[in-house]
Every structure is written in C-alpha cells, then in structure tokens.
Image (cartoon, rainbow, N blue to C red):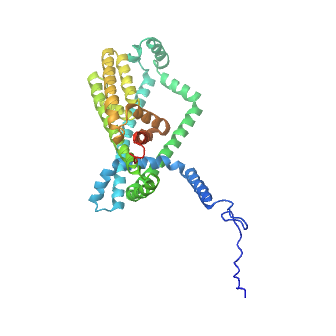
Amino acid sequence: MDEPRTERPERHANLLEANRGTDVAVLPALTVARWLLLIVIAAGVYVFHGFVFPVLAALVIAFASWPLYRRLLGLVDGSRTLAATIAILLILTFLIVPIVFAGRYAVNEVHEWVVWALEANRNGAPVPAWIASLPVVGEWLREQWTLNLGHPGGMGELIQLVSGANIRSIYQTLLAAGSKTFSLLLTILFMLIALFFAYRDGEKFAAQVDRIGERVLPTRWERISRVVPATVSSTVTGMTLIAIGEGVVLGTAYWLAGVPSPVTLGVLTGVMALVPGGAPLSFTLVSIYLAASGSPAAGLALFTWGAVELFIVDKTLRPRLVGGPVKLPFLPTFFGLVGGVETMGFLGLFVGPVLMALLVAIWREWLLDAQAPAGAPPA
C-alpha cells in the first residue's frame, strides 16, 4: 500500500532562490546583500555629505576637550545631558566673547577710517611720509596721491569713480559675503548640535566602533584606534601653544622695534600662526612697514628675529607637539598641515595631521610585520 504523499505548496522562484530544476541561485543572497549595503551607504553619503564638515569639527573639539569634559561629568554626578549642556554653553561663550571683542575693534577702526575719509574729502589728504619714502615707486605714488587725494573733494570723486564703474561687482560681492556668512552660521549650528550628542553619547558610540573594529582588525585595532584621539588632542594643544607662543614672542619683538599697536599685531600674528605660512607673512609685512617708515635697521632686525624663531619652532617644537604618540617627522607634519588646509580649510589643520599620523602608524605596523620572522605572530 502506497504511503500518502504530502503535497508541498507550490513556491515561486525568485532571484534569491534556486529555480526549480536547478541547484544554483540566479543571484546569491550574500551578493545581493552586499550590493544593497553599498547602495544604502552611497545614498547616505550623497544625502549627508553636506554635514561632514560640522561633524568632523565637532569630533575634533570633542577629542581635544574630552579630559575636561570627564572632569565636568564628575562635578554633575554623572548626568551626561547636563554635562553636555554646560559644555556647549562654555564653548558658545568661548566663541562669542572673541567675536564681540573683534567686532567692537572692527567698528572702532571703521569709524576712525570714516572720520579720516570725511576730513580728507573736506580739506584734502597729505601724502603719508612712508609712502613717499618707498624705494623705486615712492615718487610715482606721491604724485598719484597728490593728483587724486591732495585737493578738497578728491576722496569723494575717487569713491564715486570706483563704485560707479564696479557697482555690479560690489553688489555680487555683498551677496556672496551674505551667503557665506549664513552658511557659516548654519555650519556652526550643526557643529554644536553634533558636539552635544558627541559629548552625551560619545562613549557608547566609541564602544560600538571598537566592537566593529576588533572584528575587522582583531590584532591591530586597539593600537590604531587610539592614535586618532591622542593625535587630535596633541595637535590641538600643540597648535594652540605654538600660536600663543609666537604671538607673545613676535608681539614683544614688535614692541621693541617700535611698531604701532604691538599688542593687536601680536594677537593677529598668533591667529595667523595657526595657518602654515601665516606667521612669516605677518612679521614680513611688519618688517616691510618698518623699512618703508624710515627704520630699515629695525625692519631687518625684526625679520631676522622672526626667521630664527620660525626655524626653531618648525624644526624642533612643531614635530614634537603635533602628531601625538606617533611623533610625526617634519615632512609628514608639514604635508598634513598644508594639505589639510588646502582641502578642508581651517579644519584641515587638525584633520590633516590625524590622517598623516594614521598613515605613518600603518606604515610602521607593516614594517614590523615585514621584519618579523616567518610564522611569528603580528608585531
């Protein structure tokens, strides 16, 4: 007697399963899953690429200020939301106070310039002595100044001539400046939002990244992953110390050389020192001003002082302070700073050295593996 056969329900073949009569799927499920993952990642990058800059800025600030945040977290009994809120308020204060002082200084400077322009337009402006004393072009500049600005009403005529011929360019420049200012404000807002969540949930996210990294690089992840926070922290600290030091040293040199407003110029030089080439540009311009003002010896002494100080900083201090535990040599440090600024602007000052530190760390790992005996575990 034949056993009753249980009929299986008819199933329709799909792309992820084998067709009836065959043992091979049209598309393996793992392949489809990988392609779907790539598509989702590409879509995410396309949608969120505009937030890369504020998120990276938030991560840089979080890495650099994490030890201080841990202390603040202990003061508020472990309340992460409260600690993150206080940290954001402190950072806002740190950002707003310098902007307010810079704004007041700019308004005062503009007011003085407007008063001078009105007086020059009313009575005519005499040729400054330093312009007339410039070599080669001083006489020609003096003649042009006298022709255009030396008589009453000359300033108004010049402004009307320039503005009338370039009114369209001035209008487009103002629109572009307004658009960039609005974009900068949005970037700062998004950065602060990302920074708040980096403070509040940073440890959880770091633990998740560690779990994934240990599966991808089980023998090296612990060392390589610690390079990033240490490099960011040391780079921010090193760049800040170098900027403050160069501002103080060159500001003192400006005062000794008799430059007007040495404190203001020292602060500007310190800010410019954050950018590669900013400090030498600053003291070179001040040296040229001294030489053109009738003090060539003071200008030469200031330039020599700045060149020696810059050589000492770039050859000794900067490679030791920038790069953290990797101890970047001078050339990778220079390439990281300049390349970072070239591609990412001010944020590249900190992202560039981090990328170079990771490259140098991976390179040294490979060298250790290459030097290890055959069959030995990874270095």
Q: Where's residue 310, x and y in %?
A: 34, 27
Left/right placement of residue 363 relative to residue 40 reads left
- The image quarter containing residue 358 is top left
Residue 53, placed above or below residue 123: below
x, y percentage for residue 283? 36, 25
Q: Is residue 306 above or below residue 379?
A: above
Kindly indicate the quadrant of the structure image that contains residue 109.
Answer: top left
Residue at 33% across / 17% down in the picture?
300
Q: Nearer the viewer, residue 98 or 109?
A: 98
Most extreme residue toward the bottom, as rendered?
1
Q: How many marks?
A: 0
Where residue 173 sits, quadrant-wise, is: top right
Please indicate whether residue 345 sits to the left or right of residue 244 in the image.
right
- The residue nearer to you, when weighing 297 against 353, is 353
Q: Which is more toward the observer, 282 or 97? A: 282
The residue lying furthest to the front in this view is 1
Which residue is at 35% across, 29% downward? 314
